[in-house]
Image (cartoon, helix red, strand yellow):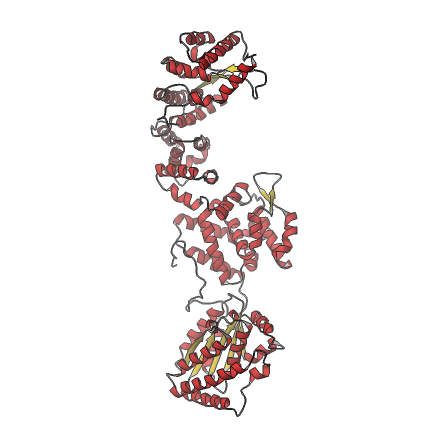
Amino acid sequence: MQKAAYGAFIHDTPFQKDKKSVSTDDSTLKELINAINNSAGEGSFSIGVFGKWGQGKTNLLMRLQEGLGAERKNTIIEFNPWKAASADKILEDFFETLSKSLKPYSSSAASQLKKYAQKTLGRSKELTFHATEALLDEIIPDSPLSERYNEINESIRLTGRRYIVFIDDVDRLSGAEIAQVFRIIRNTASFNNVFFVVAMDHHYVVEALANTKLFTKETEYLKKIFQFVIPLPPRPPMVYVEEFEKLLLEDNWSEKERENLLEGLIMLRDVAKVSSELSIHVLFEHYVDNFRDVKRLVNSFKISYRLIGDSVYFLDLLMLELLKNRHYSVYECILNRKLITQNQQDYQYWNVHSINWEKLKSQFNIHEIDSQIVFDTVKFILTKNDKKPTSQFARVNNYFLYASFQLFNLISPKLFRDLIGQDMTMIKLTFDNWIQDGKSDSLYEILDQYDTFESKEEYLKILRVYLMPGQKDGSFTNRAIHLIKDRAKYLTLFESEQDFRKELELILNDGKLGKYSRAQLAHDLLQELIYSDKSENVFTKNHLQRIIYNLFSAYLNEHLGYSHEAADFHLLNLDSRGKDRRVQLYSLANDALLRHLHSSQQNMEAYLRSIIRSHSLPNIDGEFALAPFTPDIFGSWEKFEESLKKYTVDDPDLKRLYNHTIAGIEAYKSGRDRFVVSDKSEQRWLLHHLRDNDQYSKLLPNDKDK
């Protein structure tokens, strides 16, 4: 199979001459060719090839030309009336074309034809297109024009050849232009041994002639024009299915894309297993009328598939393209959510808005017979179906994924898949650029669907990307955590559980990745053990504690002060959960933080600035609390108080915080879990302080490690 250039459009051109058509069989063509080759006589003979737009008329003419051209006594003439600028110009162009074809065999006939043409053109200009059928039907006997006609007839007969004129695309012409073509066939060029083979849409031509008001009975007039008619029968739907499959697979897809497409085409053949109302025959019988429709469908489907790929269920994507090409107004109402409503049983899915369908149905210009098929198609696309995968279009996320690419040119799954093949630095850089360009929603929608990996290497690479430093928030770290939570799903990518453990150990100790992100990952595994009372999952409890502690210690060594992040990092160091369900922190982490705070007055002042928080939100009663793990860090509230008193506080705001903290310590020492600030002005000051807390929780300017 010859493959097209990657992504190339399929042009709307006739099939090649050596391509077999199913519009009529070879035996019919052979009989027709044989009949023409054995015919000669007075006057012309005209053959009409009748078929709808795109049904294969041009293809049939090409095959006839090829067969008739094999006979040495046949001269093939192609005449294109639709290239003429006017109806009168059609007559002039025809005689010029016929004259050139006659000249090699009879220069006198060609010369006579030119003179005849001049006379005919002069007479044509005397006629208006309000002429009667009789005027169009005859050359006046015993006139100079009749004499010229007879001379040409005799000259053509003496050449001993047949002149076969092929006229295509008559249904491109206006009614007046069609009438001029028929005048040529029926009257002015009805010469001996001349055959006309004319391809046209019968219904269109009848309507166009009726609009000229020239004829009383257009259908009867056509019977006078054509002595033999070849009606092109409708093709069975499976012919279009096979052509769709062939043209789709001719493209130069990647190996993975081709594999997915083949799976999709198998599903297409078995669509009845997914839907009780639709079948492959029903779909292609309604939505595809001819090979041109197939080409349009392939072109539009290829673009959508390259943008979205298997992110949207193959059959849903195909049916959306069928609707787009046949009933665009219905397709538009799906994208605009006029035909969509929320599924009341499952808010992750849509449903068909049946009431709106009934209201809008009359605007869609769909024949009543076809209305049910179109509705069944819409219902198939928009209704949750347990026989479909999670990529089905009815799923809310998938709808927005598709709509985004169709409407807003956001990140395409194809672009995303290409990026995943790059190294992890390029992936992370591109993710950051997309987020900076305002495409975070589009990226996150794709990442939500990205949960299948081709190999262990791809899984580990993406895990590392999610843990790289420089995160603006914890969303990527959370994705890494989910990949580890779902490890049972991915263990088949590894040689064994031991292999998985070894690779995860390397990641947790990879200094190129963010310390805080790695600690969060280890914390999630540790929390899984503590809350389930298990002794081991991927690692033992003690091993995970040491990993988090080492990362925390390294973090403290690199940063001055005490920040919200330092506090959060400290809380990752779990140890156990008591009977009162209160969490205990790892003692070595408490000791490390205490050493850090005692190492400078700046660190202690930063801790003092962050220790107070509101007991409840909103704070309406003036109740405040102190950081809950303070006695764990310092050993007790008394020891914390002793530590505070070792430092001299000069800053007025810090002095106010110091006083409130001492008051809080006294409350905690007496067994309470909060303290009250009665003075309203002090309450307001403290609340403003909490609101502006970021001013003293910043890290050093060069810190970008998350």
| Near-viewer residue (693 or 73) | 693
| Near-viewer residue (705 or 247) | 705
| Near-viewer residue (646 or 204) | 646
Q: Residue furthest bottom?
A: 142
Classify residue 225 by image quadrant.
Answer: bottom right
Could you say where residue 212 lies in the image, as x and y percent from the top left?
Answer: 59, 74
How many labels, in total?
A: 0
The quadrant the N terminus occupies is bottom left
Q: Is residue 250 visible?
A: yes
Q: Residue furthest left?
A: 511
Could you say where residue 117 lies in the image, as x and y percent from the top left?
Answer: 46, 83
Residue depicted at 46% across the width and 56% down the height = 299
Residue depicted at 45% across the width and 35% down the height = 489
Residue depicted at 48% across the width and 54% down the height = 300
Q: Is residue 456 visible?
A: no
On screen, residue 492 above or below 190: above
Could you say where residue 592 lies in the image, as x and y percent from the top left?
Answer: 38, 16
- 624 to the left or right of 248: right
The quadrant the C terminus occupies is top left
Could you say where residue 248 lies in the image, as x and y percent from the top left?
Answer: 45, 56
On screen, residue 222 above or below 267: below
Residue depicted at 50% across the width and 68% down the height = 23
On screen, residue 16 above or below 643: below
Classify residue 599 by image quadrant.
Answer: top left
